[in-house]
Image (cartoon, rainbow, N blue to C red):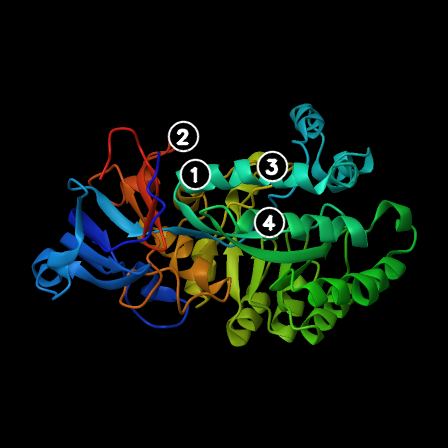
Amino acid sequence: MYNHRSMKHLLVNAGQLLTFIGPSGPRRGAEMSKTGLCRAGAVLIEDGKIVTAGSHDLVSRHPQANKARVLDVGGRVVLPGFVDSHSHPVFAAPRLKDFELRAQGKGYEQIAAEGGGILSSVDAVRKTTEDELVSRLGVWAARFIECGTTTLEAKSGYGLDLDSELKCLRAIRRVAAHTALELVPTFLGAHAVAPELVHDPHGYVRRVCEEMLPAVAKEGLARFADVFCDRGYFSEAQAETVLRAALQHGLKAKIHAEQLAHSGGAAVAARVGAVSADHLDHADAADFERLKKSGTVATLVPAANYFLGLGHYPSGRKLIEAGLPVALATDFNPGTAPCWNMQFALSLACTQLKLTPEEALCAATVNGAHALGLGATHGTLEPGKQADLIVLDVRDYREACYYFGANQVALVMKRGAIVHATQDFRP
């Protein structure tokens, strides 16, 4: 159905081309509003990378342009593929019982106390084979691609013992080898205290640091380590212990911070130099300043707030005004954000987080790439960058954030190969 071969392409007739060409680092403040918009745009691609992008007149004069396969995108909008920097896609089943209980008015922590939540997913994953996890993750990968995500961070965290965590990470590695979606693996052994050590959380932290991390690092199964630092999960001190151990094993740090309460996660992120601090619902001005100084990307996941019915959202506007680079992610997971479509996150970013459409698109592309340490190769359409791009079936880029509840992606290219196209849009 799709052309998976990377070849020389010349995309022409882009009604609006958003290149996001700009500073090399994550975008902050007013920089997040600069989309690099070109009208009547074109993109020249060869060997999986961008050769040049900009106005059709300039791109068409490139010496290699007349040798490329022309792809007319019919006046549609072209922009970088979405980089989703926070997800939990390795699980065995949806948490439908949790969903019912939440509809009855029970909260996140009440559901966990009644045997739901993360530990119910842990029980299911422990009973599931690696092959079954591979099969399920392959399905999710295809859905992300169809909705325009070309790079996805994928966490473990539903195993909570050595064998199960390794099983999850190996499943990610296997799927990454045969799917168009680029998967960036993160070890989240410190997602919750394992049920068999529920009365010995410090013992579980030792298990993560002394048993799991060395094994993950030895097999090269993850680029990042993450911790759920929050009320009822891991304390500020425990989170820092895990992340410093991870750094010693060559993994970079990420952290779930200030989601359920103000628990010190942002301070940990700043002290250890975390690449990103995610959620930040209860972060305060002091946290903003710490994260700004450490260069940490603030990753917001509004689909979780929506699904949990929390009634509040982190203030994306305040974060941007504080000078922090803001990224946007789906937080795809079976319990609190069963959403693989970044386009819904874009809508929430504008309506609930008070980002402009330009800022939201920057957060879902450029800054998402920086939240994964991939800013040098992903997130913009400029010479030498990986040719990951999407074509939206709209005429104005603001429509990407304006409409919600449907998929507006007409074509997806990953590393210069067409990996998804709608039935009525063929090269």
Circle 2 is placed at which residue position?
A: 405
Q: Residues within 10 Å of mark 4 (few under 14, many from 20)?
A: some
Give the residue type at disc 2.
Gly
What separation in Å lies between label 1 and label 3 (alpha carbons)?
25 Å
Circle 3 is placed at which residue position?
A: 135
Q: Residues within 10 Å of mark 2 (few under 14, many from 20)?
A: few
**CB contact under 8 Å: marks 4 and 3:** no
Quarter of the image where one finds residue 264 = bottom right
**CB contact under 8 Å: marks 1 and 2:** yes
Residue 64 visible in the shown view: yes
Give the residue type at disc 1.
Phe
Circle 1 is placed at which residue position?
A: 344
Foreground disc of the pair 2, 4: 4
Which circle's residue, 3 or 2, is located before the other in the chain? 3
Give the side of residue 233 with respect to residue 408, left or right: right
Quarter of the image where one finds residue 119 = top right
**CB contact under 8 Å: marks 1 and 4:** no
Which circle's residue, 1 or 2, is located before the other in the chain? 1
Q: Which of 36 and 88 lies nearest the eye of the viewer?
A: 88
Circle 4 is placed at which residue position?
A: 174
